[in-house]
Image: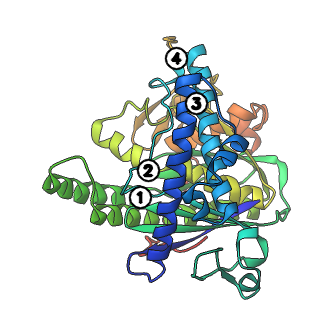
Amino acid sequence: MQLVEQHIIDKNDPRYAVIDAAAFASKNLYNAALYEMRQAFIHQGRYLSYSQVDKMMQSHEAYRALPAKVSQQILMLLERNWKSFKEAKQAYQQDPSKFTGRPQLPKYKHKTDGRNILIYTVQALGKRALKRGLIQPSMLPISIKTRHSEHIDQVRVVPRKGFYVVEVVYEKDIVQAPVNPAYYAGIDIGMNNLGALASNKPGFRPVVINGRPVKSANQFYNKRRAELQHKLGHSGTTERMERMTNKRNRRIDHYMHTASRKIIDLLVQEEIGVLVIGKNDGWKQECEMGKRTTQNFVQIPHARFISMLTYKAELVGITVKITEESYTSQASFLDRDPLPVRKPNDDTKHTFSGKRIKRGLYRASGRRFINADINGAYNIVRKVAPDAFGSEGVEDGRVSPYVVHPVRMTLTKPRKASGH
């Protein structure tokens, strides 16, 4: 499995200027090649392949300003962008309702301010340096320490406003943990509770992960950014705002890494072999919460959290299943309510045996109560494995009695981010 080690290179770093010059050359090559591809498409209706563009660009100044293998990677990336455009264009013609607008041609990067990614395959890295635990990209007089020099696949240098992120992509072997594929865990991802975890393993006590530190970081960030935006007077951004965004992102990233690690460690400890994650397409676009709540929900990177859970689970041999989660919050798990799938333009009204009566509490039939998010987590398991809880459910001991008051896990708010 491929993982990523990150390094931040800011303007105070002596390596910044060299990297910036290379990223500028990468932008020049990207724009020059994009011009040829756009002209061929606009005037002739042709899609140029990577091999055609590579042949055209080999004598170009921007191509020769970089190692050949790096220039080739830039053109391969551009070709992938065009393939994505082509596929999106075809899908749009078949069903425009799946899109928020017509797919657009790949755009040029800004002539003076634009920068582009640099991709160094292992062949474009110094071999002797790697043996010493250092990354030395070809034609760049810099060194970067790494903990994974023996398993590197490639190094990506990603431009951000005011800094660069060096991503070391490396391989890590899967080590199978002693887990039971008959034991399922479901996780309901949210905001106040970042995740609610429940399982069909007898005696498993449900867990909720506190999401308020993430929510709080967002609220502070939104307030400070709004103040700076007001002073700026237009919709642009500044390096100070970008630094603030990066700091916020890294704090949230660190918190989610810690949370996902705690969850996967717990699953291994409990020998749970399958993790079911609830996720709905169009999560952000279709959210119908209040304005302030929606703002917080949209800015919490749930997809990133799902990605962390997925790769960490797979590294220990836990199977991950991602499912749509429609009606898992409304349906009563204790009553085994049916779990329909929400369909576009379907106004069918469904009736369920219980309802959420206040924040965090769901009332099923017979005045039985269950934590609302845990109710959703159990139903997420049922979406994938309807029979996971047996025929008797609570009565046969597959559901913990702690469904009203689950274990609450609060993680220490990080002061700074680190690698994972």
- Alpha carbon of mark 2 to alpha carbon of mark 3: how far? 41 Å
Front residue of 151/140: it is 140
Looking at the rendered structure, the secondary structure element under dot 1 is helix
Asked if the residue at tag 4 contacts the one at tag 1, i.e. Cβ–Cβ closer than 8 Å, the answer is no
Q: Nearer the viewer, mark 1 or mark 2?
A: 2
- Alpha carbon of mark 3 to alpha carbon of mark 4: how far? 25 Å
Q: Residues within 10 Å of mark 3 (few under 14, many from 20)?
A: some
| Residue drawn at x 38%, y 75% as measured from the top left | 11
Asked if the residue at tag 2 contacts the one at tag 1, i.e. Cβ–Cβ closer than 8 Å, the answer is yes
Dot 1 or dot 3: first in sequence order is 3
Q: Which of marks 2 and 3 is in front?
A: 3
Left or right of 341 on screen, residue 358: left
Front residue of 247/61: it is 61
Dot 2 or dot 3: first in sequence order is 3
Residue at the spot of label 2? 300
| Residue drawn at x 48%, y 11% as measured from the top left | 347
Asked if the residue at tag 2 contacts the one at tag 4, i.e. Cβ–Cβ closer than 8 Å, the answer is no
Q: Looking at the rendered structure, which numbered label has been put on residue 96?
A: 4
| Residue drawn at x 56%, y 66% as measured from the top left | 258
| Residue drawn at x 28%, y 37% as measured from the top left | 291
Residue at the spot of label 1? 214
Residue at the spot of label 3? 40
- Alpha carbon of mark 4 to alpha carbon of mark 2: how far? 28 Å
Left or right of 80 on screen, residue 289: left
